[in-house]
Image (tube, rainbow, N blue to C red):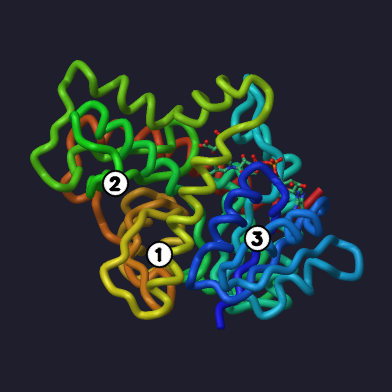
Amino acid sequence: MVKAVIAGASGGIGQPLSLLMKLCPLVDELALYDVVNTPGVAADLSHISSTAKITGYLPKDDGGKAAMKDADIIIIPAGIPRKPGMTRDDLFKINAGIVKGLIEIAAEVAPKSFILVISNPVNSTVPIAAEVLKAKGVFNPQKLFGVTTLDIVRAETFVAEIAGKKTGSELTVPVIGGHSGETIVPLFSQISPSGISIPDDKYDALVNRVQFGGDEVVKAKDGAGSATLSMAYAGYRFAEKVLKAAKGEKGLVEPSFVYLPGVPGGKEIAEKTGCDFFSVPIELGPNGAEKATNVLGNITEKEKKLLDACTTGLKDNITKGVTFAHNPP
Ligand code: NAD
Ligand code: LMR
């Protein structure tokens, strides 16, 4: 029996992600938690004739604990989104506390669950989550993931457009680093299948579009929030891989923002980048993150420059999260 939880289930990402998880044959029970509207969202989804049993919880009567109790996987898209002119870091003040509170509940009632953090700024909220879990004595780095899949999805889509390939085909583009602006590093030299190269005159614009794809959506939504539908797809894609791998399916790899020293193969990447939290392609298995793939060995000169800019900003974001977890205001 697999119990999945979505915390922030009534929001722009939460609702379509809840729909996708309700349709997932790997999920037996789906608990929806939010500070508003979960009874309605749960009632609506409960009429769908797929197998997952739906429940909805609000904070009253310790609803957070009831929702998360004994969960196998907890996905967190709770928190405010950007408006035009904001950076993801501008969300820190509000979202840091929201994520901290939710992880405290998870640590208490579902310490063994996979935890997938979507809430921004991911570069800081994942370190906060790790510190909270450590303080409660239940941190398993192989089970804590910052969801950066949307960067990979965007890179796949934009590369397919340039390369004249069908989107949705078997194109893999590793994107590493963090999840904001220059901390997002696409490795176009490692596109699979091999043989696709990005023309020099399109390279900078393509890097920029992957790094600032989120801003493209924020601008187009014009004050109504940030990416929700593409994020629900990306979050579902990652969660489904985690669940399939937990059941024993092999060969499932997806980049994710993890605590590298705690993942096999991650220590040397952390030493090389100077960042303990970093996204690289992760091989998933029954224990979660089974292996971090070192893709830094054969990167190009241009990618090295991107990586330098990435690690400078990312280190500060990580420190900000760790500091907050130890000294909340
Ligand atoms: P939204 O405002 O539409 O939804 C957020 C939901 O969180 C709301 O329903 C709200 O009630 C709920 N919430 C707030 N505090 C909560 C708490 N303490 N417990 C439970 N629920 C709580 O926002 P959205 O568009 O769904 O975005 C959510 C977050 O995801 C934002 O921080 C956004 O920046 C981030 N995001 C991340 C990625 C990524 O790639 N990782 C992509 C898109 C958006
Ligand atoms: C994204 O990449 O779309 C998200 O991180 C949301 C945002 O603020 O851009």
Looking at this rendering, what residue extends furthest in the left direction? 195
Q: Secondary structure at mark 1?
A: helix
Crowd class of label 2 (few under 14; some 14 to 19; many from 20; radius 10 Å):
many
Image coordinates for residue 324, horizontal then vertical, percent? 70, 50
Residue at which label 3 appears: 6
Amino acid at dot 2: Pro
**193 relative to 16 in the view: left or right:** left
* N-terminal label among 2 and 1: 2
* N-terminal label among 2 and 3: 3
Give the image quadrant in which the ligand numbered 1 is located.
Answer: top right
Are dots 3 and 1 in contact, CB under 8 Å?
no
Q: Secondary structure at mark 3?
A: strand
Q: For residue 223, what is the image quadrant? A: top right
Of circles 2 and 3, the one toward us is 3
Residue at which label 1 appears: 241
Q: Residue at x 28, y 60 (%)?
A: 293
Q: CA distance from mark 3 to mark 1?
A: 16 Å
Q: Residue at x 72, y 77 (%)?
A: 69
